[in-house]
Image (spheres, grey):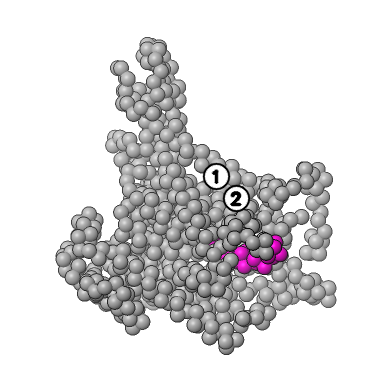
C-alpha cells in the first residue's frame, strides 16, 4: 500500500508539469505579439474602455515575461503556479484569488445540493430497477433515464425558463441570479425561501443528467453483483431478499458509485459554464465564461490550472478510495 | 425472484426467428444488434439525419429545383440565377403551391420546388418572428429567415463536426493507444501521462478558451474537439493491445519475423476495433453536443451559416413568446444525440459476449 501510494504520488510529478505546460500554451495562443492582440481587441470590441490595449500588452508582457525566451517563460510560469500566484485580472485589476474566493461559495453551494440530490434519488431508483430486471417498470425507468441522459442541459434550461419564467406560459419561478435584489437584508427565513426559489431551476438543470447517469450506473453495477455466486449463496442460506439486496449486493455495488464522488470534486470548483451563464449565477462557471469573453488571461489560466489540479487530486483520491474499500484489489 | 429468470423463458427468439447461423464476428454482432428495436430505430434516425444533411440544398432552397421555361429545362438550384424571363423566384414563391407549380400564368411553364422553398440565409424582415404557419412550417427567426430551412442546413454543421472531430480523435487515439499498448515501457509511460494530463484539464472550458482565441471557423471547431477527445479511445486501444500482445498468435507472428508495423496493423488492430467503434459512435453524440453548446454560447460557426445551437441561442432573446425557436432546434439536437447514443448502446451490448445468448 505504501509503495503504491508513493509510486502514484511520483507519477503525479510529470502530470503536474504537463498541466502547467498546457496552461502555458494558452497564453502562447493568446497574442504574444501586440499586433494580433490589437486586432482582436478592435474586432471584438469587448474590452473595457478604461484599459487601453497598449496597457494590456505591456502588462501581459511583464506578467508572463513574454519578452524572454520561451523556456524561461515556461519556468517563470511553473514557479507562479507552485506559489499559487495568478496575478491580477485584466478586467478590474483585482487579484485573481479574490475574484475566485468571491465566486467559489456560490458554486460549491449549488453543486453540493445538486450532488446530494443526485445520490439521494439515483441510488434508490437504480436499486429498484435492478431488483426487477426486464419488468415493465424497469424498462420504462431505463428508457426514461436514457432519454434524460441525452437531453442537452442548455436546451432544458431554456425550455424551463420559457415554461416557468414568465412570458406566454407560467410566471412562477425566478430565472435570474440566486437572490432577489436586497435579499441580504431580509430576515433569515424569507431570505432562505427566496434563495431556494431561485435555485429550483438551475439545480434541476445541474441535477437531471447526473441523476440519470448515476441511476444507470447503479443499476448496471447491481445487476452485475446480483449475478455473483455469493449472492446465490446468501439466498441459498435463506436470507431475506431485503438482506440480500441491501447488505450483500448493494454494499459491493456501491464501490464505483462512491469513487465517482472523487470525480465530482472539479465540478464543485469549476461549476457549469453553460448553466451558470444562462441563469446569471455569479459562480465559477460564469467567472470563467466572462474571462473567456473578455480575454482575461490570468483568470482563464488560474481556473484551468486549479481545476486540473483538483481533478488530479480527484483521480488520485478515487484510486486510493478504491484500494481502501475493496481489499480484493491488489496494488502493484 | 432472480432464480427463475436464470432459465431463459424466451424460447421463441430461438425457435421462430432462427436465422442462418451467424458466421463471422461482425455478422454475429449485426444479428444481435438487429434484435434491439431501439438501437435499430436510432440507426434509422441517424441515417435519415445523415441523408438530410447531404441533400439539404435539395430539401430547402430558395430556388426551384428545375424550371421549364418555353419548353426548355433549367436547373436553377445549381446555376444560382435569380429568375428566368419574366419570372423571379421571389414573386413565384408568393403563390407557390407545394413542390410543383403547374402552368404558371397559363403560359405552360412549370417549376418543381424543394420541399422548403426558402434558403437558410434569405430573410424577409416583414415576416420576422412569426410562429409556425402554412408557409413557414417551423416559424421564422428575428430576421425573418425560415427556421425549418435553417435547421435542415444546420444539420450539416452538427453532423460534419461530429464525424470529422471523431475522425481526428480516432486517428490520434488509435495511434497513441496502439503504440502505448504494444511497446510498453517508456512509450507507454509518456502516452499514459499525456492521457492523464488531458483528462484532468476541464475539457469544455479549454475548448471555449481556445475557440475564443482562434478565428471563427468550422474547421477550428472540428480540430479542437478532435484534439481534446481522443483520450478515451486511446485508453481502450491501449488496454486491448496490452491483452492482445500476450496471446499466442501475436507471439507466432513475431517468431515468423513479422515487422512491428505488420503485427500492429494486420494482426492486432482488427481485433481491437470493436470497442473503438462503440466509442466512435458515442463520440459523435458527444461532439454534436459540444458543437451545439459552443454555438449556443456564441462560439460556433461564423454567421450567417446556420446551426442548431445558434438558432437556440437566438431564442433566448425572445423567450417570452417565440417558443418555436426553442423547441424545434433543441429537439433536433436531442434527437441526433439520442440516435447516436442508442446505436452506440446497441452496438456495445451486441458486441459483449457476456450478453450473447
Q: Position of residue B144 (x, y in %)?
A: 33, 38
The quadrant in which residue A133 appears is bottom right
Q: Nearer the viewer, residue A283 or B112?
A: B112
Q: Check chain identity for marks 2 and 1: say if they share one.
A: yes
Q: Is residue B265 visible?
A: yes
B26 up-or-down from A131: above or below = above
Count of numbered circles in the view: 2
Q: Badge 2 sits on which subunit?
A: B
Judged left or right of residue A233, residue A48 is left
Q: Earlier in the sequence, mark 2 or mark 1?
A: 1
Magenta stretch, main secondary structure, is helix
Judged left or right of residue A201, residue B90 is left
Residue for point 62% across, 64% down:
B240
Q: Which residues are magenta?
A: B233-252
Q: Nearer the viewer, residue A294 or A150?
A: A294
Q: Badge 1 sits on which subunit?
A: B
Q: Residues within 10 Å of mark 2 (few under 14, many from 20)?
A: many
Q: Residues within 10 Å of mark 1 (few under 14, many from 20)?
A: many
Q: Position of residue B132 (x, y in %)?
A: 42, 37
Q: Which residue is mark 1?
A: B46
Q: Nearer the viewer, residue B226 or B294?
A: B226
Q: Position of residue B87 (x, y in %)?
A: 32, 19
Q: Quadrant of the N terminus of chain B?
A: bottom right
Q: Nearer the viewer, residue B251 or B120?
A: B251
Residue for point 29% across, 75% down:
A73
The residues tagged by marks 2 and 1 sit, at their Cα atoms, a distance apart of: 9 Å
Residue for point 77% across, 43% down:
B19
Q: Which residue is mark 2?
A: B343
- Labels 2 and 1 touching (C-beta < 8 A): yes
B54 up-or-down from A81: above or below = above
Amino acid at each position: 500500500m505504501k509503495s503504491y501510494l508513493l509510486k502514484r504520488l511520483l507519477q503525479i510529478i510529470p502530470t503536474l508539469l504537463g498541466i502547467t505546460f498546457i496552461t502555458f500554451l494558452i497564453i502562447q495562443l493568446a497574442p504574444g505579439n501586440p499586433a494580433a492582440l490589437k486586432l482582436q481587441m478592435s474586432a471584438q470590441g469587448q474590452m473595457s474602455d478604461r484599459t487601453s490595449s497598449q496597457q494590456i500588452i505591456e502588462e501581459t508582457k511583464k506578467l508572463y515575461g513574454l519578452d524572454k525566451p520561451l523556456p524561461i517563460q515556461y519556468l517563470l510560469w511553473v514557479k507562479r503556479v507552485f506559489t499559487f500566484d495568478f496575478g491580477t485580472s485584466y478586467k478590474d485589476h483585482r487579484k485573481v484569488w479574490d475574484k475566485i474566493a468571491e465566486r467559489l461559495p456560490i458554486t460549491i453551494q449549488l453543486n453540493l445540493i445538486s450532488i446530494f440530490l443526485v445520490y439521494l434519488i439515483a441510488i434508490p431508483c437504480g436499486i429498484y430497477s435492478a431488483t426487477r430486471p426486464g419488468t415493465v417498470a424497469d424498462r420504462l425507468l431505463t428508457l426514461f433515464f436514457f432519454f434524460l441522459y441525452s437531453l442537452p442541459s442548455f436546451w432544458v434550461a431554456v425550455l424551463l425558463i420559457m415554461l416557468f419564467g414568465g412570458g406566454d406560459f407560467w410566471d412562477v419561478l425566478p430565472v435570474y441570479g440566486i437572490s432577489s435584489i436586497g435579499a441580504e437584508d431580509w430576515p433569515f427565513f424569507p431570505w432562505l425561501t427566496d434563495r431556494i426559489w431561485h435555485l429550483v431551476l438551475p439545480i434541476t438543470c445541474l441535477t437531471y443528467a447526473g441523476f440519470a447517469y448515476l441511476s444507470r450506473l447503479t443499476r448496471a453495477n447491481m445487476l452485475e453483483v446480483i449475478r455473483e455466486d455469493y449472492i446465490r449463496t446468501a439466498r441459498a442460506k435463506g436470507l431475506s431478499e431485503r438482506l440480500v439486496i441491501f447488505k450483500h449486493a448493494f454494499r459491493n455495488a456501491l464501490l464505483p458509485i462512491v469513487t465517482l464522488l472523487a470525480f465530482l470534486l472539479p465540478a464543485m470548483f469549476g461549476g457549469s459554464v453553460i448553466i451558470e451563464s444562462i441563469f446569471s449565477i455569479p459562480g465559477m462557471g460564469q467567472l470563467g465564461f466572462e474571462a473567456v469573453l473578455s480575454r482575461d488571461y490570468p483568470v482563464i489560466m488560474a481556473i484551468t490550472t486549479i481545476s486540473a489540479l483538483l481533478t488530479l487530486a480527484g483521480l488520485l483520491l478515487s484510486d486510493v478510495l478504491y484500494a481502501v474499500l475493496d481489499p480484493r484489489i491488489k496494488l502493484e | 425472484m432472480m432464480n427463475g429468470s436464470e432459465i431463459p423463458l424466451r424460447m421463441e427468439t430461438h425457435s421462430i426467428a432462427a436465422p442462418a447461423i451467424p458466421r463471422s464476428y461482425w455478422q454475429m454482432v449485426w444479428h444481435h444488434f438487429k434484435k434491439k428495436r431501439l438501437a435499430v430505430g436510432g440507426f434509422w434516425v441517424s441515417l435519415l439525419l445523415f441523408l438530410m444533411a447531404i441533400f439539404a440544398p435539395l430539401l430547402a432552397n430558395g430556388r426551384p429545383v428545375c424550371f421549364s421555361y418555353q419548353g426548355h429545362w433549367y436547373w436553377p438550384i445549381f446555376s444560382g440565377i435569380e429568375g428566368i424571363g419574366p419570372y423571379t423566384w421571389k414573386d413565384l414563391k408568393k403563390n407557390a403551391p407545394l413542390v410543383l407549380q403547374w402552368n404558371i400564368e397559363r403560359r405552360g411553364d412549370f417549376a418543381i420546388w424543394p420541399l422548403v422553398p426558402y434558403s437558410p440565409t434569405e430573410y424577409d424582415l416583414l415576416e420576422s418572428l412569426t410562429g409556425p404557419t402554412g408557409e413557414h412550417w417551423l416559424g421564422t427567426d428575428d430576421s425573418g429567415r425560415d427556421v425549418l430551412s435553417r435547421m435542415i442546413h444546420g444539420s450539416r454543421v452538427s453532423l460534419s463536426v461530429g464525424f470529422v472531430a471523431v475522425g481526428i480523435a480516432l486517428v490520434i487515439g488509435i495511434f497513441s493507444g496502439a503504440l502505448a499498448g504494444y511497446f510498453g515501457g517508456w512509450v507507454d509511460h509518456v502516452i499514459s501521462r499525456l492521457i492523464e494530463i488531458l483528462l484532468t484539464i476541464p475539457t469544455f472550458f479549454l475548448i471555449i478558451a481556445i475557440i475564443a482565441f482562434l478565428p471563427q471557423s468550422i474547421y477550428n471547431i472540428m480540430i479542437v474537439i478532435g484534439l481534446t477527445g481522443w483520450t478515451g479511445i486511446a485508453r481502450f486501444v491501449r488496454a486491448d493491445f496490452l491483452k492482445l500482445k500476450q496471446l499466442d498468435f501475436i507471439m507466432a507472428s513475431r517468431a515468423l519475423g513479422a515487422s512491428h508495423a505488420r503485427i500492429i496493423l494486420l494482426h492486432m488492430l482488427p481485433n481491437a476495433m470493436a470497442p473503438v467503434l462503440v466509442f466512435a459512435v458515442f463520440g459523435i453524440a458527444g461532439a454534436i453536443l459540444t458543437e451545439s453548446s459552443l454555438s449556443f454560447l456564441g462560439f460556433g460557426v461564423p454567421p450567417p451559416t446556420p446551426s442548431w445551437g445558434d438558432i437556440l441561442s437566438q431564442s433566448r432573446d425572445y423567450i417570452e413568446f417565440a417558443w418555436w425557436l426553442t423547441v424545434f432546434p433543441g429537439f433536433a439536437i436531442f434527437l441526433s444525440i439520442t440516435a447516436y447514443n442508442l446505436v452506440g448502446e446497441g452496438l456495445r451490448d451486441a458486441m459483449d459476449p457476456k450478453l450473447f445468448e
